[in-house]
Amino acid sequence: MKRTLTGKAEKRLNSFYLLICTLPLLWLSGCKPQARDRSLPPALRPELLQKFESIKDLGLRQEKAYEFLKQITSIGGRLTGSPEADRAVELTASLMAEQGFDRVWTEPVKVQRWVRGQAEEAMVRSSKLGTQALSICALGNSLGTPVNGVEAGVVEVRSFEELSALKDIVPGRIVFYNVPMDRTVVEPFAAYGRAAQFRVRGASEAARYGARAVLIRSMTFRVDQNPHTGLMEYDDRAPRIPAAAVSTAGAELLHHWLQTDPELKVWLRTNCRQEEPVTSANVIGQLTGSEFPDEIILIGGHLDSWDLGPGAHDDAAGCAVAIEVLRLIKETGLKPKRTIRAVMFMDEEFGGTGGRAYAASDHRKQEKHLVAIEQDRGGAAPVGLAFSLESLADRLKPLLAYLGPLGINWIRTGGGGVDIAPLREKGTILGGLIPESQRYFDYHHSALDVPEAVHPRELELQAVILAMVIYFLAEQGV
Amino acid sequence: MKRTLTGKAEKRLNSFYLLICTLPLLWLSGCKPQARDRSLPPALRPELLQKFESIKDLGLRQEKAYEFLKQITSIGGRLTGSPEADRAVELTASLMAEQGFDRVWTEPVKVQRWVRGQAEEAMVRSSKLGTQALSICALGNSLGTPVNGVEAGVVEVRSFEELSALKDIVPGRIVFYNVPMDRTVVEPFAAYGRAAQFRVRGASEAARYGARAVLIRSMTFRVDQNPHTGLMEYDDRAPRIPAAAVSTAGAELLHHWLQTDPELKVWLRTNCRQEEPVTSANVIGQLTGSEFPDEIILIGGHLDSWDLGPGAHDDAAGCAVAIEVLRLIKETGLKPKRTIRAVMFMDEEFGGTGGRAYAASDHRKQEKHLVAIEQDRGGAAPVGLAFSLESLADRLKPLLAYLGPLGINWIRTGGGGVDIAPLREKGTILGGLIPESQRYFDYHHSALDVPEAVHPRELELQAVILAMVIYFLAEQGV
């Protein structure tokens, strides 16, 4: 039709389509949208908006992202190097092949194999208050206690400064880092970032002063009996001592008992160990670009998870969304000019070896990754987008006129992810969709991170929006 | 300090405070905020930002809104005119008195008393497929079936047009409105609005053609066994027939059985009835303005709920937030110039008699309501604000520089609520905070609307933000 119309008539027709396409959105939003008076840029021509509508309708009608998530979580926890992680490699490769993507393959990654062993146990014993079980879990990377466990007095601290001040009483004791996530910090990831340093560095800092083990308060705003695991690291200049997380309810109990009986003892036994490294894999699927097949827009998540639960938000959600983005683009009949690639990275949790292997692979030599997106902030409702290049963020802003009613109200500079970070030095723009996150740390790294904690429509909205943005990028380039 | 400084020095000092106050926010947001280059207007002077910080810290540390919500929901369902609604009146009056608000009182409201009676029952009976129970509930306002129930063949329709086309086979049958909420509509309230007409008007439309009863597919995106109730209305020009909602899983089953056996029968028994009207009450508490006590900023929710669950999102959340807004302002030591009033309206669900009684009361004659806010869209994370007066919405926009990191990314024209609507003709500006709503209809009007479905921090963020906005309005006027 385009060819048979003069410029003016085409413009009128475009305005008409635009009205038709935009009206329902104005109505849907319930209120007048922010951008109502801003004329849409040429990039948002009616043909594109119709494609966006098709993606939205297909996605919201089928909610397939949640189906993918349920299949991945049905494996259970997918600890790096574990048989469950291997099964997740097979499963997601099959899933992507079933969707008929143009290519599906795996690339090997050498990963460490940390094993939790038998369930951990801990008790607090007080001559004044009695005996009480504490709910704990070993931290990833930690060595285990001796087979009979460790029993010792406890030094409670709320900072490294306090630890240093109390260093004279640390030798032979268990250091208990009781540092809650700061509730007055609105953004949970920021509160987490501040608290997580004790989990990561706490063992070596305490071992330097002669501690026998460390207990870390779990990183969650909620007070419950679920310990939250996560990575810890040893500093080679300090002795290696066992490190475990205690549930927030256990931390509260221990804190209160210590007020009455500073001489109480904690006994804990953990059974974790390092085994020999194994070969695992990143799983990759793509829709090959029709004009620029070597120019790539990447969308990824990480396939490994912690082992206390099936890692639904962290990060089956990101993997499911990546697969669904490609499926939505394919099923809508779109043929992007540039390649759109889904990558399920292996081993984010133990340090991102999968991301580094991906970036360093010889396969990358022929390829140019224009944009890489990693979804690893949970599967909740979308609130914004972030891209590491300000000019790209600005260029995408006209999309807000369409994306606003879908929940995306800002596009900022920022964004990134452990697994895509190594691509940055190759000139790749990093980015991602930012979801609502107030509930995220309720589940994070714990037994509570189950599919029931993810909402099918919220997850699908992530995929729908990312499919639109990624298709747009694959058509327009950067 | 203000008096001892020259204008210029004061300005420098203000800029310094501004930097101190704003920096953590920039950091918290994780990305550069949208408004980073926009200089803050005089309204956002550092003293105000410090008050906002105090409100935020107090709210997020204590999460009292959720405590109020739990107390209200512990009563159970609070059907208009029921003893439970009476208890809710007493409870919230006590709660507000305990907070030390300047005045707490009730105002009478005459309300209808609809009684559900014994639990409803329904069966589908097919000579080909067997017998299966259907999960149903009577709709509010409906009359009950005869004591032995109604058994009849079924006419399934998806629109009033289809009903009209099938009118010849309607006499003597049960009309089954199987109209799902449209999943492709992003905004759940919009999808609900379209589907709810069958619940509200369906009985009379079907009765006109001789139907004996109607079954309405529950209004939720989820497919489960929970029927969702809600208000229905009779048209005086049509016979009155019983109306019930069937769970979405029940609706799917009935639909599939009808494909195989169009002659199947449904039997249903409902035991609801209207009793004599009773006197109930709106519950009101306030912080009296120090300069303009008769100028009022109102924040309300509705105290009644449906009876299948304890009405946590709908609308214990709104009541809890209203109480918490006043508590936060009081506990932070703020003394607003204008009166800030919390109103728990009675009888929103059966048509808003409480809201009308409030607006019509003689007490209102001395008062000028500048702004009225009703929170009745659930207790989830805040996403925006809406006010019925565009100039006010525009005037509040500078607050976005502060509210953005708290989740509020837009302020639009719009807003309102059943109970505050009668104030509009008196010149009151209506408004509200818009929460994320993808999960709302999973719970709405069903047994699933329990406190566990509300997140303490998300609810508190509503109260924190509204406390800031309402305090700002009470200081500045409109």
Image: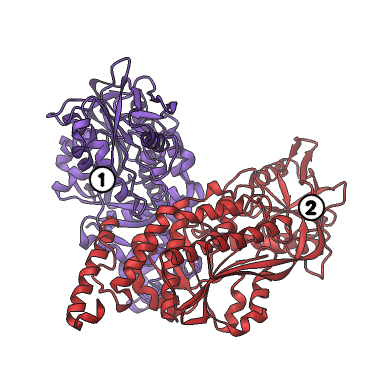
Chain colours: A red, B purple
Drawn side of residue A376 relative to residue A362, left or right: left
Q: Residues within 10 Å of mark 2 (few under 14, many from 20)?
A: many
Give SS at disc 2: strand
Q: Are marks 2 and 1 in contact (CB under 8 Å)?
A: no
Residue beneath disc 2: A174
Q: Looking at the picture, tell me which residue is in the foreground, B220 or B49.
A: B220
Instruction: Depth check: give the residue in front, A124 or A156.
Output: A124
Host chain of mark 1: B
Q: For residue B417, which numbered disc appears in the image?
A: 1
Which percent across, then down, holds residue B287?
A: 31, 44
Q: What residue lies at 39% left-to-right and 49% top-to-bottom?
A: B463
Front: mark 2 or 1 = 1
SS under mark 1: loop
Number of residues whose C-alpha sits closer than 10 Å to that of mark 1, classed few (under 14), some (14–19) or many (20 or more): many
Q: In the image, is residue B140 above or below residue A114?
A: above
Whether marks 2 and 1 lie on the same chain:
no
Circle 2 chain:
A
Quadrant where the N terminus of chain A is found in the figure: bottom left
Can residue B229 be seen in the rendering of this structure? yes
Residue B36, percent from left and from top: 40, 73
Q: Which corner quadrant of the image does residue A195 belong to?
A: bottom right
Which of the pair B391/A234 is nearer the observer? A234
User: Residue flagged by tag 1: what amino acid is it?
Assistant: Gly
Q: Tell me which amino acid carries mark 2.
A: Ile
